[in-house]
Image (cartoon, rainbow, N blue to C red):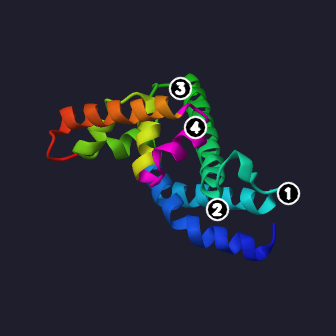
Amino acid sequence: MRETDFERLYEEHAQALFAFLAYRTGDRVLAEDLLADTFERVLKAKKGYDARKGGEKTWIYTIALNLLRDHVRRRETERRSLAEHAADGALPDDPFRTVESRDVIGRALEKLSPEEREAVSLRYGGDLSVPEVAKVLGEPLDRIEGRVYRALRKLRAELGAEVV
């Protein structure tokens, strides 16, 4: 990838991608790390993105989402390992739950399924369109539209219509 292409991609997408990652993780430092890892992979990509498969934004968010999923899996493995070896069974708090449970919106988000939370995070935290969310998740558009609609309906019921 040419340096000018990389710089353009970073300028166009880094701020919104950071907002998505910070929204999804609730941890600015982790979001910064994931953002750096995402753009490191973008830079190292031999072929770059394939325009036939979607836009640059979709490609970058897919990389970021995969990194986030990998992080969550590693974290869960570490948590299970600690649980097996902890004498008193006490575990450090999961940073995702800690942040979400700090406020009313966090508690409402916990009521959503993981798939709904992910779709809402990409749509509103990442400022992706619903078709872009569908491409990032590799699922049909109508399924994602329904998922986002159901999630928003649940959030409205939980928070009250004036909040959402």
Q: Residues within 10 Å of mark 4 (few under 14, many from 20)?
A: many
Q: Which residue is mark 2?
A: 36
Query: What residue is shown with label 1?
Result: 46
Q: Is residue 45 above or below residue 157?
A: below
> Could you tell me the amino acid type at mark 4?
Leu
- Alpha carbon distance from label 3 to label 1: 40 Å
Residue at image coords 75%, 54%: 49
Identify the secondary structure beneath mark 3.
helix
Residue 72 position by quadrant: top right
| Quadrant showing the C terminus | top left
Q: Which residue is mark 3?
A: 83
Marks 2, 4: nearer the viewer = 4
The amino acid pointed to by label 3 is Ala
- Going by the numbered disc 2, the residue's amino acid type is Ala
Q: Is residue 114 visible?
A: yes
Real-space Cα separation, disc 4 to disc 3, in angstroms: 31 Å
Q: Position of residue 29 (x, y in %)?
A: 51, 59
- If you read the primary sequence from the N terminus, does the residue marked by circle 1 or circle 4 appear first? 1
Nearer-N-terminus badge (3/1): 1
